[in-house]
Amino acid sequence: MFGTSAGTNLGPLLFIIYMHDIPAKIFPKFADDVVSVVVESDVMHITKELQQSVDDLVNWSQKWEWFLISVKPRSCCLEKLMMTLFS
């Protein structure tokens, strides 16, 4: 086993230390979840940027020997919603 026990005071601090150099387009969200956001009108550009974020995260995790668990990968495109709200 690696890491610290759940509920320890040291666990969150160690996590913050590890996350200090996470790729620039990846943002910590909650606990050990991360998110990448791209705001753009071109769907192909969005796809390219998000894929680059995933690639950067995989490379970062390999550098630090972290295992990524992609149980909840999601993407959300708000194009139609935004067009409805602002038209």
Image: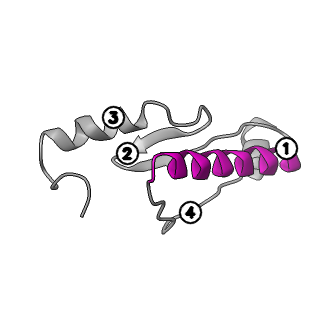
Tell me the magenta residue range: 43-65
Mark 1 to mark 2 CA distance (whole Å): 27 Å
User: What's the amino acid at mark 1?
Assistant: His
Residue 14, position as x, y percentages in the image: 27, 38
N-terminal of the two: label 4 or label 3?
3
Viewport quadrant of the C terminus? top right
Which residue bears the numbered disc 3? 16
Label 1 secondary element: helix
N-terminal of the two: label 2 or label 4?
2
Mark 4 to mark 3 CA distance (whole Å): 22 Å
- Residue at 55 percent across and 45 percent down: it is 60
Which residue bears the numbered disc 4? 73
Q: Nearer the viewer, mark 3 or mark 1?
A: 3
Asked if residue 44 is among those painted magenta in the image, a careful observer would answer yes
User: What's the amino acid at mark 2?
Assistant: Phe
User: What's the amino acid at mark 4?
Assistant: Pro
Which residue bears the numbered disc 2? 30
Asked if residue 79 is among those painted magenta in the image, a careful observer would answer no
Label 2 secondary element: strand
